[in-house]
């Protein structure tokens, strides 16, 4: 469903999102998820290194954290985008 929206003809998606100003495009959610995960992963990498003292273990933890939480954040964003509470 989300991939279909990303791959649709730009003209048809522009008109859909123009009609619903309260909604975000899925691509915006992807970019937000990636940027937030970079910040979160650097935090996880630092904390993991401080706790383990091992760069390899810290990097492994940070990599798994990056991948899983990026997907969770994306779907969390898409779900919240469907909730009208708090929107103008």
Image (cartoon, rainbow, N blue to C red):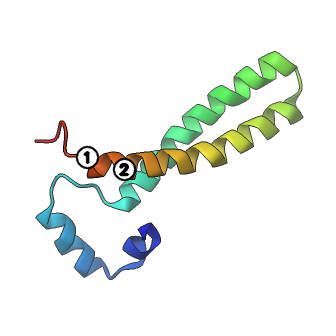
For the point 28% across and 52% down, which residue is it?
82
Residue 31 location (% of width, % of height): 45, 52
Q: Badge 1: few (under 14), some or many (20 or more) residues near its Cα, within 10 Å? A: few
For the point 72% across and 37% down, which residue is it?
62
The label number, if any, that marks residue 12 in the structure image? none
Q: Quadrant of the N terminus?
A: bottom left
For the point 71% across and 21% down, which residue is it?
47
66 horizontally vs 34: left or right = right
The label number, if any, that marks residue 79 in the structure image? 2
Which residue occupies the foreground of this view, 87 or 9? 87
Q: Badge 2: few (under 14), some or many (20 or more) residues near its Cα, within 10 Å? A: few
Which residue occupies the foreground of this view, 83 or 16? 83
Element on which disc 1 rests: loop
Residue 51 location (% of width, % of height): 81, 17
Discs 2, 1 touching: Cβ within 8 Å = yes
The label number, if any, that marks residue 83 in the structure image? 1
């Amino acid at each position: 469903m989300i991939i279909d929206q990303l791959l649709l003809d730009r003209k048809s998606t522009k008109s859909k999102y123009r009609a619903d100003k309260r909604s975000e495009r899925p691509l915006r959610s992807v970019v937000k998820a990636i940027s937030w995960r970079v910040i979160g992963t650097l935090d996880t990498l630092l904390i993991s290194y401080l706790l383990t003292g091992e760069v390899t273990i810290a990097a492994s933890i940070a990599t798994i954290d990056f991948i899983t939480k990026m997907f969770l954040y994306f779907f969390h964003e898409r779900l919240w985008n469907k909730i009208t509470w708090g929107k103008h």
